[in-house]
Amino acid sequence: MEPRYREHAHAQAMFEKVERFLASRLSQAAFCQQEGLAYWTFRYWLKRHRLRGTVTAPPQTQTTTIAANPESLSDFIPLRLLPTEPAAPPPACVIEYPTGVIVRFHGPVEGAVLAQLLHTQPA
């Protein structure tokens, strides 16, 4: 067997294990114990799987179909999404003193005020 083929076959086997993990409801540690995998080896292949997914697969929207059977909904936790507030703009100027005091200006600041603040040490 060619070395490249063995590497590819091993990678495919590990990616299949990662996909089984993603479909399971187990923690990473529990899955590794069940499969007889070293935890950090599994983490390596999980990262490679995620990178492979972001590099090779085009962005897709995921849709989930929920059965009409109310019993199948018992595992779901109701979730209510609230509209978010727009993020505040970053401060225009930040002064950090060695004592830990931080002064942030979110608007225009006069040069004289900045000069005075830069030459004083707050207690």
Image (cartoon, rainbow, N blue to C red):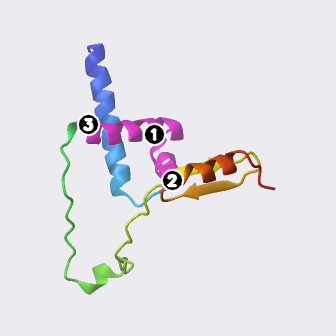
Q: Split into 4 quadrants, where in the image is the N terminus?
A: top left
- In the rendered structure, which amino acid carries the disc numbered 2? Ala
Other-residue count near label 3 (Cα within 10 Å), few / some / many at <14 / 14–19 / ≥20: few
User: Mark 2 or 1 closer to N-term?
Assistant: 2
User: Which residue extends farthest top?
Assistant: 2
* Front-lying residue, 50 or 75: 50
Residue receiving disc 3: 55
Q: Secondary structure at mark 2?
A: helix
Q: Are marks 2 and 3 in contact (CB under 8 Å)?
A: no
The reply to whether the magenta stretch includes residue 90 is no
Q: Is residue 119 above or below residue 24?
A: above
Q: Which mark is residue 42?
A: 1
Identified at 38% across, 51% down, the residue is 21
Q: Quadrant of the C terminus?
A: bottom right
Question: Percent position (x, y) of residue 91?
Answer: 50, 55
51 drawn magenta: yes
Kind of element beneath mark 1 = helix
108 vs 57, left or right, is right
Report the Cα–Cα distance between label 1 and label 3. Answer: 20 Å
Determine the residue located farthest toward the right in the rendered image.
123
The crowd level at tag 2 (other Cα within 10 Å; few <14, some 14-19, many 20+) is few
Q: Nearer the viewer, residue 43 or 2?
A: 43
Q: Earlier in the sequence, mark 2 or mark 3?
A: 2
Mark 1 nearby-residue class (10 Å; few <14, some 14–19, many ≥20): many
In the drawing, what numbered circle is on residue 14?
none
Q: CA distance from mark 2 to mark 3?
A: 28 Å
Q: Secondary structure at mark 3?
A: helix
Q: According to the image, label 2 marks what residue?
A: 30
Rendered location of residue 42, percent (x, y) = 45, 39
The mark nearer the N terminus, 1 or 3, is: 1
